[in-house]
Amino acid sequence: MAVYAVAFIAYAIDLARRSAAATAAVAVAVEAPAAVGAPVSTKVAEPVEAAAAVEAPASTSSANGAMAYGRSPSLRVGVAMTVVAWLLHLAADVTRGIAAERVPWANMYEFALTGTLIITTVYLLVLVVSKHDLRFLGTFVTGLVLVLLGVATVNFYVSVVPLPPALQSAWLVIHVFVATSSVGFFALGFALSVVQLLQSRRESLVASAKAVKQSFLATLPDSATLENLAYRVTIVGFILWTFTLMAGAIWAEAAWGRYWGWDTKEVWTFIIWVVYAGYIHARATRGWRGSRSAWLAIIGFSTVLFNFTVVNLFFKGLHAYSGL
């Protein structure tokens, strides 16, 4: 957790540097006409012209609408520390499994340990395969991992215990691993949707010719690009969650003699599926773009967190394997 905290601080410093770089770029763009001998006018610039100058100076904007931003040492430190934290996290997860002589996700503490590991894995994987520079999400990802790990360590930690009979199945490996993998993709889609909402609000202020304070958002992709990225990532998570739902039904039939019994955990797994199915359907066929699709993605991840915390802690049922 200490290494994740260092990475979080480095990413936060990078966001602060981005804000400073955006402000400096706008200042240079405003001063440039005077420097080349442009006539000085005492007339106040039109609001729309001023907003356009702030939003996208020709010399400092990239193809996707983001203001150009140079390499940041703090950003490289953040990514390096995230990789180190991931290696230590992986070692902790593997050693927990070795100590238990089984896969390390049979109770809430172990699920949190493995789930946050997969969230970080998905983030690092996307950094490698994506054509967009998504390192700015490091603040959100490492912050989320720190919170979840902290809560799990303080409130959910339990010693290694043998598996209950119902969990002594190969489906424990398949079903829960796929579920945690889908949560990793949902978490990244959630982070992208939050940034999309912030960016969309900023763009609407610029479009209405209102004064906009320069921030790190000026150096990030536009809201449409962020929305498309969130949609693609969420689709991967939805496919994995669909398999989770089906695999859970098969496992339930093997363990309890029925595919579906309206157990609380089963119901909430289905609710999560319905919310994300609605998100994908509304965006693909009903034209729900912009903030509406982002809010649906955020609501979807909120149901995932509710399922992991409130349902596991306060609802009783056949899936009461929190270990607490």
Image (spheres, rainbow, N blue to C red):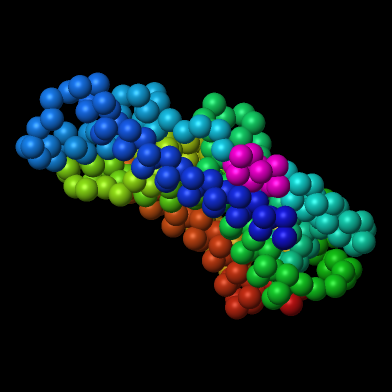
Which is more toward the observer, 93 or 283?
A: 93
Which is more toward the observer, 182 or 251?
A: 182
Question: 143 above or below 67?
Answer: below
Q: Per the image, is 74 magenta?
A: yes
Q: How many marks can you see?
A: 0
Q: Per the image, is 287 magenta?
A: no
Left or right: residue 219 versus residue 244 is: left
Is there any visible trace of residue 287 in the rendered image?
A: no
Query: Which residue lies at the image location 71% right of the left edge and 74% below the top edge?
Result: 154
Tell me where residue 37 appears, x and y as whole percent.
20, 22
Query: Which residue lies at the image location 44% right of the left edge and 54% below the top edge?
Result: 298
Question: 174 above or below 42?
Answer: below
Q: Main secondary structure of the magenta part?
A: helix
Q: What range is drawn magenta here? A: 73-82
Left or right: residue 112 versus residue 238 is: right
Tell me where residue 263 appears, x and y as whole percent.
61, 68
Tell me where residue 194 appears, x and y as whole percent.
43, 51
Query: Which residue lies at the image location 28% right of the left edge and 42% below the top edge?
Result: 203
